[in-house]
Amino acid sequence: MRIVMLSWEYPPLVVGGIATHVGGLARALAKSGHEVVVLSLHASEVPDDTTVEGVRILRANIDLPWLPDDNLVGRMASANHQITRLAADLGAWRPDVVHAHDWLVAWAGDTISHLWNVPLIATIHATERGRHGGHVPPGTPAAINSVEWWLAYQANLVICCSKFMIREVVSGFDLPVEKVHLVANGVDLAEWERPTAPLQTTEPLVVGWGRVQYEKGFQVLARAVGALRQRVPGIRCVIAGRGSYLAELQTQIDVEGLSDIVNLAGFVPDADLRKMLHGARCSVIPSLYEPFGIVALESMAAGAPTIVARTGGLAEIVEGTGAGLLFEPGNHHELADRIDEVLTRPDLADGLQRAAADLLATHYTWDAIAKSTLSVYTAAVSQAE
């Protein structure tokens, strides 16, 4: 099958989990013998037209017309014109399907699918309604919600990464349930594999990482670690990542007197992040809202005993598997208890690691995810005939 994917981010341009998902999926599809082209944005480290692991990546070097910085939706719509122009570089080559990842490429995905008269598949990775606790504030969030609604309506079929997200998308966008398909995220096990000689030390190091936004819950992790200062001597926590909540989180840490045991590391290169996880005694994904939680898969693949909030896709990954511990989102006291258990019970930590390895190998390889995605493509093409 010939496939065009559109994504606002693609490695080495990484903003959040979408780049990881699209990169893993595209490579797995190409490895299976399919022709895959990704249309994305310029990254200074690589050429704007290159082929990596069988995937051709075309990148738009965006020169936006002047628009106010706070007009996010207008800026994105303008940038989509540049992404659409990339289609001309494909010459006579035509895809069987167009696959748009999230609202940021909605306009380009819809336009290109109509120009080529092929089905449009849309993956909704998260919703603005979900990010705001189930309601849509006025202004930019309402505008984004409208674009998400329109993309879901225009698409022939919609993909969501968890049952939680299917419920959110079906109810939020008034979609027929048969239009929405479940395809999970995956993880590259070899990329995160622990070294032969484990780096894990006796130091009680707790690691959290991701985009530092309020809904990611790192403020809950900081308070939980603070509550363990006396119970777990020498405990230390590193939170890696950047985001709009970083300054407020640092203020909380300073005010609560946690700066000696909780360190905000900012951006950490992938190689260093993996090394840190390999040496961690446990990792925590404390999200208040999480459509899937690909970081949980990465944590498990790195061999770090994993604790996650019982929310959204995180709960679906871990519940009933023995691969991780859960706590109620926002409850730092319960999270502190879970961290304490992992740090003080080596038998529990070992059991979590073994169960996680089995779970990933069975359900979350990119080959398995590519096979599921391909079945959605095939269904869309059949419906269009």
Image: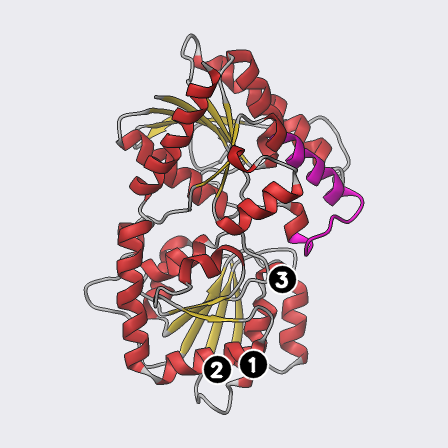
Lower sequence index among marks 1 and 3: 3
**Disc 3 and disc 2 in contact, CB within 8 angstroms:** no
For mark 2, give the secondary structure. Answer: helix
Residue identified by numbered label 3: 246
Crowd band around label 3 with a 10 angstrom C-alpha radius: few (<14), some (14–19), many (20+)? some
> Which amino acid type is marked by label 2?
Asp
Residue 268 visible? The answer is no
> Which amino acid type is marked by label 1?
His
* Magenta segment main secondary structure: helix
For mark 3, give the secondary structure. Answer: helix
Q: Which of the 4 quarters of the picture holds residue 243?
A: bottom right
Q: Residue furthest left?
A: 196
Residue 117 part of the magenta-drawn span: no
> Which amino acid type is marked by label 3?
Leu
Which residue is pictured at 39% across the width and 68% down the height?
324
Residue identified by numbered label 2: 337
Crowd band around label 2 with a 10 angstrom C-alpha radius: few (<14), some (14–19), many (20+)? some
**Disc 1 and disc 3 in contact, CB within 8 angstroms:** no
The stretch in magenta equals 131-151
Residue 333: image tag: 1
